[in-house]
């Protein structure tokens, strides 16, 4: 059963971005390098504490997906990281927070089992994946600290313009079919205009499956980020981790605007995708589940989880609109 304190923490976080202990979400550890001035080409090693919200999903000690801390016991990730696996597999998954260098035990490292998983009801694994989002409820509470902190969710009316520089961190491959790093890496990715994103994903879809005439287009629940010339991207193993962007308040806080979902290759150029370019050589920007579009689903699941575990019918959560 959730304690009254944990229910208060959930209410405060959903409404104000502040947990019951008084700390704010989306704030990197003091002294860590994280900001709009970050310069990386093709990715670089992160600094310890720059992504305190990032988690590593591990099976038998091996990393396979990322995620982000939302509260002391809720983790945001991609549906495809979990939906196709058996209960036996999920029972062996460890959710590791405070991770930086996977070769050593970092100071605030903690590992948890998964108590329950909520996958979006409209998720389907076939490309192009839509509604690729899931929430994990942990078996115990995370002990927050300097290097373990939650990420903020964007407000429904947040305006984050195309071209905004965002950051993605993870332990995914350093290049297509390349090696997996032991130490956390990060890359700066600029948001792609939604119309351009939709167009390039159409060119990728046409290369992966036949197009049926007069077929309705699926809902667009994704956003794109990355340069047309390629060279900077997410890759295998980064799935589920957050694409974080600077909050509009200018207070040095970051919000999880996207959840790493998929892409055509890793770091391929995509500005010249066309029917004349062989399908096998086409690329795409990084494709991320658009968190803003799915905020009602996220908050509904968090509300249900808090009420079911806490048995407290007086908890009221509303979306902040200012």
Image: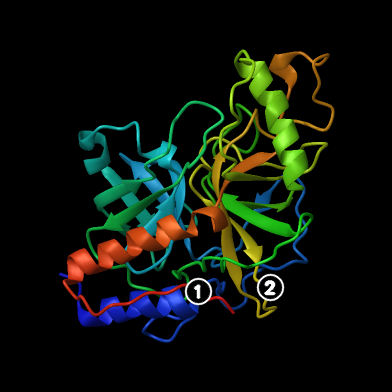
Q: Which part of the image, by quadrant, shows the C terminus?
A: bottom right
Q: Which residue is mark 2?
A: 248
**Residue found 43% across the figure and 37% down from its top:** 123
Whole-percent x, y for residue 261 in the image: 54, 40
295 and 251: which is toward the camera: 295
Label 2 secondary element: loop
As displayed, is residue 108 above or below residue 113? below
Task: Answer with left or right where residue 213 lies relative to residue 172.
Answer: right
Q: Percent position (x, y) of residue 64?
A: 43, 39
Q: Nearer the viewer, mark 1 or mark 2?
A: 2
Residue 104 is at least partly visible in this image: no
Task: Count residues near mark 1 (Cα–Cα under 10 Å), then give few for <14, some for 14-19, many for 20+.
Answer: many
Of all residues, the one furthest to the front in this rendering is 214
- Toward the bottom, the furthest residue is 22
Image quadrant occupied by the N terminus: bottom left
Q: CB of mark 1 within 8 Å of CB of mark 2?
A: no
* Mark 1 vs mark 2, CA separation in Å: 14 Å
Residue 149 is situated, as x and y percent measured from the top left of the image, at 45, 71
**Residue drawn 61% across the image and 74% down it:** 253
Q: Residues within 10 Å of mark 2 (few under 14, many from 20)?
A: some
Q: Is residue 301 left or right of residue 149?
A: left
Please provide percent x and percent y for residue 70: 42, 64
Tell me if residue 10 comes above or below residue 110 in the rendering: below
Q: Name the disc covering residue 239, or none.
A: none
Residue linked to disc 1:
25
Looking at the image, which residue is at 37% across and 74% down? 317
Please report whichever mark, 1 or 2, sits nearer to the chain's N-terminal start: 1
Q: Quadrant of residue 155?
A: bottom right
Which of these two is toward me, 247 or 149? 247
Q: Is residue 305 visible?
A: yes
């Amino acid at each position: 059963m959730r304690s009254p304190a944990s229910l208060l923490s959930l209410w405060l976080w959903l409404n104000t971005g502040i947990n019951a202990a008084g700390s704010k979400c989306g704030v990197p550890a003091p002294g860590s390098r994280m900001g709009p001035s970050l310069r990386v080409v093709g990715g670089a090693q992160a600094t310890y504490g720059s992504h305190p919200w990032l988690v590593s999903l591990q099976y038998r000690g091996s990393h396979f997906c990322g995620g982000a801390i939302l509260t002391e016991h809720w983790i945001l990730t991609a549906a495809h990281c979990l939906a196709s696996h058996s209960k036996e597999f999920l029972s062996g998954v460890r959710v590791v927070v405070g991770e930086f260098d996977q070769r050593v035990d970092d100071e605030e490292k903690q590992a948890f089992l998964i108590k329950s998983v909520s996958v979006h009801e409209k998720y389907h694994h076939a490309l192009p994946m839509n509604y690729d989002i899931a929430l994990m409820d942990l078996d115990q509470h995370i002990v927050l600290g300097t290097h373990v902190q939650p990420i903020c969710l964007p407000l429904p009316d947040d305006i984050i313009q195309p071209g905004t520089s965002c950051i993605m961190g993870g332990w995914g491959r350093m290049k297509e079919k390349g090696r997996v790093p032991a130490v956390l890496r990060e890359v700066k990715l600029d948001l792609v205009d939604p119309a351009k994103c939709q167009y390039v994903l159409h060119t990728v879809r046409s290369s992966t499956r036949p197009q049926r005439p007069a077929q309705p287009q699926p809902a667009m629940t994704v956003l794109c980020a990355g340069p047309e010339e390629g060279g900077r991207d997410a890759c295998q193993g980064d799935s589920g981790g957050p694409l974080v962007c600077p909050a509009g308040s200018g207070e040095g806080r970051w919000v999880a605007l996207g959840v790493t979902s998929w892409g055509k290759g890793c770091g391929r150029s995509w500005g010249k995708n066309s029917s004349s370019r062989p399908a096998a050589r086409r690329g795409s920007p990084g494709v991320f589940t658009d968190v803003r579009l799915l905020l009602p689903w996220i908050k509904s699941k968090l509300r249900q989880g808090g009420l079911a575990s806490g048995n407290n019918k007086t908890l009221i959560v509303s979306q902040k609109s200012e």
